[in-house]
Image: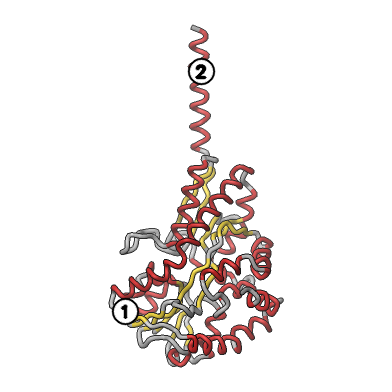
Amino acid sequence: MNIKKTFIYALTTVFLFTAVGESFAKTLKASHQWPGTKRKDGKFDVRHEMVQIIADEIKKANVGIDIRIYPAKSLYKPKEQWKPMTTGQLDISAFPLAYAAKFHPEFDITLMPGMVKNHKHALRVNKSPMMKEIRKIINDAGVIVLSDAWLAGGFVSKKNCITSPDTVKGQVFRAAGKAFNQMLAAAGAGIQKMPSSEIYNGLQTGVLTGANTSSGSFVSYRIYEQVKCATPPGKFGLWFMYEPILMSKKSFDSLNKKQQKALMAAGKVAEKYMTKEAAGLDTTMEKAYKKNGVKLAYMTQKDFDAWLAIAKKSSYKNFAEKVPGGQKLIDQALAVK
Protein backbone atom coordinates (compact mmCIF):
# COMPACT_ATOMS: atom_id res chain seq x y z
CA MET A 1 0.00 0.00 0.00
CA ASN A 2 2.83 2.38 0.95
CA ILE A 3 4.59 1.58 -2.31
CA LYS A 4 1.40 2.36 -4.22
CA LYS A 5 0.96 5.69 -2.40
CA THR A 6 4.60 6.59 -3.00
CA PHE A 7 4.23 5.83 -6.72
CA ILE A 8 1.05 7.94 -7.01
CA TYR A 9 2.72 10.78 -5.12
CA ALA A 10 5.78 10.67 -7.37
CA LEU A 11 3.64 10.57 -10.51
CA THR A 12 1.57 13.52 -9.30
CA THR A 13 4.72 15.49 -8.53
CA VAL A 14 6.12 14.87 -12.02
CA PHE A 15 2.80 15.89 -13.58
CA LEU A 16 2.58 19.08 -11.55
CA PHE A 17 6.22 19.94 -12.24
CA THR A 18 5.67 19.45 -15.98
CA ALA A 19 2.45 21.47 -15.97
CA VAL A 20 4.06 24.30 -14.03
CA GLY A 21 7.09 24.21 -16.34
CA GLU A 22 4.90 24.46 -19.43
CA SER A 23 2.73 27.20 -17.96
CA PHE A 24 5.85 29.23 -17.16
CA ALA A 25 7.50 28.76 -20.57
CA LYS A 26 9.26 31.98 -21.55
CA THR A 27 7.29 33.94 -24.15
CA LEU A 28 9.23 35.90 -26.75
CA LYS A 29 7.53 38.63 -28.76
CA ALA A 30 8.22 38.72 -32.50
CA SER A 31 7.13 41.74 -34.53
CA HIS A 32 7.01 42.59 -38.22
CA GLN A 33 5.09 44.81 -40.65
CA TRP A 34 3.83 42.26 -43.20
CA PRO A 35 0.39 40.61 -43.27
CA GLY A 36 -0.02 37.49 -41.17
CA THR A 37 -2.79 36.21 -43.41
CA LYS A 38 -2.59 34.27 -46.66
CA ARG A 39 -2.49 36.14 -49.98
CA LYS A 40 -4.66 35.38 -52.99
CA ASP A 41 -2.12 32.76 -54.11
CA GLY A 42 -2.60 30.91 -50.83
CA LYS A 43 0.85 31.79 -49.49
CA PHE A 44 2.09 34.00 -46.68
CA ASP A 45 4.67 36.76 -47.07
CA VAL A 46 8.10 35.11 -46.93
CA ARG A 47 9.25 37.24 -43.99
CA HIS A 48 6.24 36.16 -41.95
CA GLU A 49 7.06 32.59 -42.98
CA MET A 50 10.64 32.98 -41.73
CA VAL A 51 9.48 34.11 -38.30
CA GLN A 52 6.87 31.34 -38.23
CA ILE A 53 9.55 28.75 -39.10
CA ILE A 54 11.64 29.93 -36.14
CA ALA A 55 8.58 29.72 -33.87
CA ASP A 56 7.74 26.22 -35.14
CA GLU A 57 11.33 24.97 -34.80
CA ILE A 58 11.54 26.30 -31.25
CA LYS A 59 8.28 24.57 -30.37
CA LYS A 60 9.63 21.28 -31.75
CA ALA A 61 12.86 21.74 -29.78
CA ASN A 62 10.82 21.79 -26.54
CA VAL A 63 13.22 24.08 -24.69
CA GLY A 64 10.65 26.10 -22.71
CA ILE A 65 10.20 28.96 -25.18
CA ASP A 66 7.02 30.14 -26.87
CA ILE A 67 7.31 32.72 -29.67
CA ARG A 68 4.26 34.92 -30.11
CA ILE A 69 4.13 36.63 -33.51
CA TYR A 70 2.63 40.10 -33.96
CA PRO A 71 2.32 40.69 -37.74
CA ALA A 72 1.02 43.67 -39.72
CA LYS A 73 2.67 46.29 -37.43
CA SER A 74 0.25 45.25 -34.66
CA LEU A 75 2.87 45.64 -31.91
CA TYR A 76 5.24 48.32 -33.26
CA LYS A 77 5.30 50.56 -36.30
CA PRO A 78 7.88 49.34 -38.86
CA LYS A 79 10.56 51.95 -38.17
CA GLU A 80 9.99 51.89 -34.41
CA GLN A 81 11.18 48.30 -33.89
CA TRP A 82 14.93 48.91 -33.70
CA LYS A 83 15.19 50.80 -30.39
CA PRO A 84 12.96 48.35 -28.44
CA MET A 85 15.20 45.51 -29.65
CA THR A 86 18.30 47.28 -28.35
CA THR A 87 16.70 47.59 -24.89
CA GLY A 88 15.06 44.16 -24.72
CA GLN A 89 11.47 45.43 -24.90
CA LEU A 90 11.07 43.65 -28.25
CA ASP A 91 12.63 40.22 -28.58
CA ILE A 92 12.58 39.37 -32.31
CA SER A 93 11.83 41.21 -35.55
CA ALA A 94 11.90 40.66 -39.30
CA PHE A 95 13.49 44.01 -39.97
CA PRO A 96 14.69 45.90 -43.08
CA LEU A 97 18.02 47.08 -41.69
CA ALA A 98 18.10 50.39 -43.58
CA TYR A 99 15.08 51.44 -41.47
CA ALA A 100 17.55 51.94 -38.60
CA ALA A 101 19.97 54.09 -40.60
CA LYS A 102 19.00 57.20 -38.61
CA PHE A 103 20.70 55.53 -35.63
CA HIS A 104 23.50 53.89 -37.61
CA PRO A 105 24.00 55.56 -41.03
CA GLU A 106 26.27 52.69 -42.09
CA PHE A 107 23.14 50.55 -42.51
CA ASP A 108 22.26 52.44 -45.71
CA ILE A 109 24.91 50.33 -47.47
CA THR A 110 22.41 47.43 -47.24
CA LEU A 111 20.09 49.23 -49.67
CA MET A 112 22.52 50.85 -52.09
CA PRO A 113 21.50 50.98 -55.79
CA GLY A 114 23.24 48.31 -57.84
CA MET A 115 25.40 47.15 -54.93
CA VAL A 116 23.98 43.61 -54.99
CA LYS A 117 23.67 42.21 -58.50
CA ASN A 118 21.51 39.09 -58.04
CA HIS A 119 20.46 36.46 -55.49
CA LYS A 120 23.66 34.42 -55.81
CA HIS A 121 25.73 37.57 -55.46
CA ALA A 122 23.79 38.39 -52.26
CA LEU A 123 24.97 35.12 -50.70
CA ARG A 124 28.57 36.09 -51.46
CA VAL A 125 28.01 39.57 -50.03
CA ASN A 126 26.86 37.91 -46.78
CA LYS A 127 30.37 36.51 -46.34
CA SER A 128 32.16 39.75 -47.20
CA PRO A 129 34.23 42.06 -44.95
CA MET A 130 31.52 44.68 -45.51
CA MET A 131 28.86 42.50 -43.86
CA LYS A 132 31.28 41.61 -41.08
CA GLU A 133 31.50 45.34 -40.32
CA ILE A 134 27.70 45.73 -40.47
CA ARG A 135 27.13 42.77 -38.14
CA LYS A 136 29.61 44.25 -35.65
CA ILE A 137 27.59 47.49 -35.60
CA ILE A 138 24.40 45.46 -35.11
CA ASN A 139 25.98 43.48 -32.25
CA ASP A 140 27.49 46.54 -30.58
CA ALA A 141 24.03 48.13 -30.58
CA GLY A 142 22.66 45.19 -28.58
CA VAL A 143 21.10 43.13 -31.38
CA ILE A 144 22.09 39.83 -33.01
CA VAL A 145 21.29 38.26 -36.39
CA LEU A 146 19.31 35.01 -36.34
CA SER A 147 18.79 34.74 -40.12
CA ASP A 148 20.25 36.56 -43.10
CA ALA A 149 17.84 37.57 -45.87
CA TRP A 150 18.21 39.65 -49.04
CA LEU A 151 15.17 40.51 -51.14
CA ALA A 152 15.20 41.84 -54.69
CA GLY A 153 12.76 44.53 -55.73
CA GLY A 154 11.67 46.80 -58.53
CA PHE A 155 9.50 49.76 -59.51
CA VAL A 156 5.81 50.44 -60.08
CA SER A 157 3.98 53.49 -61.42
CA LYS A 158 0.45 54.76 -61.95
CA LYS A 159 1.66 56.82 -64.93
CA ASN A 160 4.23 55.02 -67.08
CA CYS A 161 6.73 52.16 -67.07
CA ILE A 162 9.98 52.81 -65.19
CA THR A 163 13.09 51.78 -67.09
CA SER A 164 15.64 54.53 -67.79
CA PRO A 165 16.18 57.45 -65.35
CA ASP A 166 14.18 59.91 -67.47
CA THR A 167 11.02 57.81 -66.89
CA VAL A 168 10.75 59.00 -63.25
CA LYS A 169 10.90 62.73 -63.97
CA GLY A 170 7.94 64.61 -62.53
CA GLN A 171 6.69 61.63 -60.55
CA VAL A 172 6.46 61.30 -56.76
CA PHE A 173 8.13 58.14 -55.47
CA ARG A 174 8.42 56.17 -52.30
CA ALA A 175 11.83 54.60 -51.80
CA ALA A 176 12.83 52.43 -48.86
CA GLY A 177 15.99 54.24 -47.83
CA LYS A 178 18.15 57.33 -48.14
CA ALA A 179 20.33 55.98 -50.97
CA PHE A 180 17.38 55.36 -53.29
CA ASN A 181 15.78 58.66 -52.27
CA GLN A 182 18.94 60.50 -53.29
CA MET A 183 19.26 58.64 -56.60
CA LEU A 184 15.60 59.16 -57.54
CA ALA A 185 15.74 62.85 -56.58
CA ALA A 186 18.88 63.27 -58.72
CA ALA A 187 16.93 61.75 -61.63
CA GLY A 188 14.14 64.32 -61.23
CA ALA A 189 11.57 62.54 -59.04
CA GLY A 190 9.83 63.91 -55.97
CA ILE A 191 10.18 61.85 -52.77
CA GLN A 192 7.71 60.83 -50.05
CA LYS A 193 9.12 58.82 -47.14
CA MET A 194 7.03 55.96 -45.77
CA PRO A 195 7.32 52.23 -44.96
CA SER A 196 6.21 49.73 -47.60
CA SER A 197 3.06 49.01 -45.60
CA GLU A 198 1.80 52.52 -46.54
CA ILE A 199 2.50 52.39 -50.30
CA TYR A 200 -1.00 51.15 -51.19
CA ASN A 201 -2.70 54.10 -49.45
CA GLY A 202 -0.12 56.52 -50.84
CA LEU A 203 -0.91 55.45 -54.41
CA GLN A 204 -4.65 55.27 -53.76
CA THR A 205 -4.83 58.81 -52.36
CA GLY A 206 -2.51 60.35 -54.97
CA VAL A 207 0.29 61.14 -52.53
CA LEU A 208 2.45 58.84 -54.68
CA THR A 209 2.56 58.14 -58.40
CA GLY A 210 5.24 55.46 -58.08
CA ALA A 211 7.21 53.35 -55.65
CA ASN A 212 9.98 50.84 -55.24
CA THR A 213 10.10 48.02 -52.74
CA SER A 214 10.76 44.28 -52.61
CA SER A 215 9.05 41.77 -54.90
CA GLY A 216 7.53 40.17 -51.81
CA SER A 217 5.98 43.42 -50.57
CA PHE A 218 4.66 44.27 -54.05
CA VAL A 219 2.57 41.10 -53.86
CA SER A 220 1.72 40.94 -50.14
CA TYR A 221 0.41 44.50 -50.10
CA ARG A 222 -1.56 44.02 -53.39
CA ILE A 223 0.07 47.07 -54.98
CA TYR A 224 -1.04 45.69 -58.36
CA GLU A 225 -4.50 47.09 -57.59
CA GLN A 226 -3.18 50.66 -57.83
CA VAL A 227 -0.68 50.76 -60.71
CA LYS A 228 -0.50 50.56 -64.51
CA CYS A 229 3.03 49.25 -64.97
CA ALA A 230 5.60 47.30 -62.96
CA THR A 231 9.34 46.78 -63.44
CA PRO A 232 10.36 43.48 -61.80
CA PRO A 233 14.05 42.85 -60.96
CA GLY A 234 14.71 40.87 -64.15
CA LYS A 235 18.32 40.47 -65.29
CA PHE A 236 19.33 43.95 -64.16
CA GLY A 237 17.85 44.35 -60.71
CA LEU A 238 18.82 47.69 -59.20
CA TRP A 239 17.08 47.13 -55.84
CA PHE A 240 18.28 44.64 -53.22
CA MET A 241 17.62 45.07 -49.51
CA TYR A 242 18.96 43.29 -46.45
CA GLU A 243 15.98 42.22 -44.31
CA PRO A 244 17.26 39.85 -41.63
CA ILE A 245 15.55 38.26 -38.65
CA LEU A 246 17.03 40.05 -35.66
CA MET A 247 16.91 39.43 -31.92
CA SER A 248 17.56 41.58 -28.90
CA LYS A 249 20.90 40.59 -27.34
CA LYS A 250 19.45 41.34 -23.91
CA SER A 251 16.62 38.87 -24.55
CA PHE A 252 19.05 36.31 -26.00
CA ASP A 253 21.42 36.58 -23.04
CA SER A 254 18.52 35.98 -20.62
CA LEU A 255 18.09 32.46 -22.05
CA ASN A 256 19.99 29.35 -21.02
CA LYS A 257 22.56 27.74 -23.33
CA LYS A 258 20.14 25.09 -24.60
CA GLN A 259 17.55 27.73 -25.52
CA GLN A 260 20.17 29.91 -27.22
CA LYS A 261 21.44 26.98 -29.26
CA ALA A 262 17.88 26.08 -30.31
CA LEU A 263 17.19 29.66 -31.43
CA MET A 264 20.35 29.90 -33.52
CA ALA A 265 19.55 26.54 -35.12
CA ALA A 266 15.98 27.67 -35.85
CA GLY A 267 17.35 30.84 -37.43
CA LYS A 268 19.50 28.79 -39.79
CA VAL A 269 16.47 26.72 -40.85
CA ALA A 270 14.59 29.94 -41.67
CA GLU A 271 17.61 31.34 -43.54
CA LYS A 272 17.93 28.18 -45.61
CA TYR A 273 14.24 28.42 -46.51
CA MET A 274 14.64 32.06 -47.55
CA THR A 275 17.67 31.24 -49.71
CA LYS A 276 15.61 28.63 -51.55
CA GLU A 277 12.59 30.91 -51.98
CA ALA A 278 14.31 34.23 -52.82
CA ALA A 279 14.47 34.07 -56.63
CA GLY A 280 10.96 32.60 -56.78
CA LEU A 281 9.57 35.77 -55.18
CA ASP A 282 10.44 37.71 -58.33
CA THR A 283 8.58 35.19 -60.52
CA THR A 284 5.61 35.31 -58.15
CA MET A 285 5.54 39.10 -58.55
CA GLU A 286 5.54 38.83 -62.34
CA LYS A 287 2.68 36.31 -62.33
CA ALA A 288 0.59 38.30 -59.86
CA TYR A 289 0.92 41.54 -61.83
CA LYS A 290 0.21 39.88 -65.17
CA LYS A 291 -2.86 38.20 -63.73
CA ASN A 292 -4.17 41.56 -62.53
CA GLY A 293 -3.68 43.29 -65.87
CA VAL A 294 -0.57 45.29 -65.00
CA LYS A 295 1.92 45.85 -67.82
CA LEU A 296 5.46 44.58 -67.19
CA ALA A 297 8.64 46.34 -68.30
CA TYR A 298 12.29 45.39 -67.83
CA MET A 299 15.50 47.36 -67.54
CA THR A 300 18.21 46.82 -70.12
CA GLN A 301 21.95 46.92 -69.43
CA LYS A 302 21.93 50.47 -70.80
CA ASP A 303 19.16 51.49 -68.36
CA PHE A 304 20.97 49.86 -65.43
CA ASP A 305 24.25 51.59 -66.30
CA ALA A 306 22.49 54.97 -66.56
CA TRP A 307 20.93 54.51 -63.12
CA LEU A 308 24.25 53.40 -61.63
CA ALA A 309 26.00 56.49 -63.04
CA ILE A 310 23.43 58.71 -61.29
CA ALA A 311 23.70 56.67 -58.07
CA LYS A 312 27.48 57.03 -57.97
CA LYS A 313 27.18 60.82 -58.27
CA SER A 314 24.46 61.02 -55.60
CA SER A 315 23.94 58.06 -53.24
CA TYR A 316 27.48 56.66 -53.32
CA LYS A 317 29.06 60.12 -53.10
CA ASN A 318 26.90 61.16 -50.14
CA PHE A 319 27.51 57.89 -48.32
CA ALA A 320 31.27 58.09 -48.81
CA GLU A 321 31.44 61.72 -47.65
CA LYS A 322 28.99 61.71 -44.73
CA VAL A 323 29.14 58.23 -43.19
CA PRO A 324 32.15 57.33 -41.05
CA GLY A 325 34.08 54.66 -42.94
CA GLY A 326 31.60 54.97 -45.81
CA GLN A 327 34.10 54.73 -48.65
CA LYS A 328 35.68 51.66 -47.06
CA LEU A 329 32.27 49.93 -46.89
CA ILE A 330 31.55 50.80 -50.53
CA ASP A 331 34.95 49.45 -51.63
CA GLN A 332 34.43 46.24 -49.63
CA ALA A 333 30.99 45.72 -51.16
CA LEU A 334 32.14 46.41 -54.72
CA ALA A 335 35.05 43.99 -54.26
CA VAL A 336 32.58 41.08 -54.01
CA LYS A 337 32.37 39.51 -57.46
- For mark 2, does the 10 Å Cα neighbourhood hold few (<14), some (14 to 19), or many (20 or more) residues? few
Location of mark 2 (residue): 9
x%, y% of residue 211?
Answer: 43, 80
Residue 79 in sight from this viewpoint: no
Q: If you read the primary sequence from the N terminus, does the residue marked by circle 2 or circle 1 appear first?
A: 2
Which colour scheme appears in the figure?
secondary structure
Q: What is the number of callouts on the image?
A: 2
Kindly state the secondary structure of the residue where label 1 is placed: loop
- What residue does disc 1 label? 294
Marks 2 and 1, how far apart at CA: 69 Å
Asked whether residue 165 appears in the rendered view, the answer is: yes
Left or right of 200, for residue 82: right
Identify the disc placed on residue 75: none
Q: Quadrant of the C terminus?
A: bottom right
Residue situated in front as seen by the camera: 316 or 73:
316
Disc 2 marks a residue whose amino acid type is Tyr
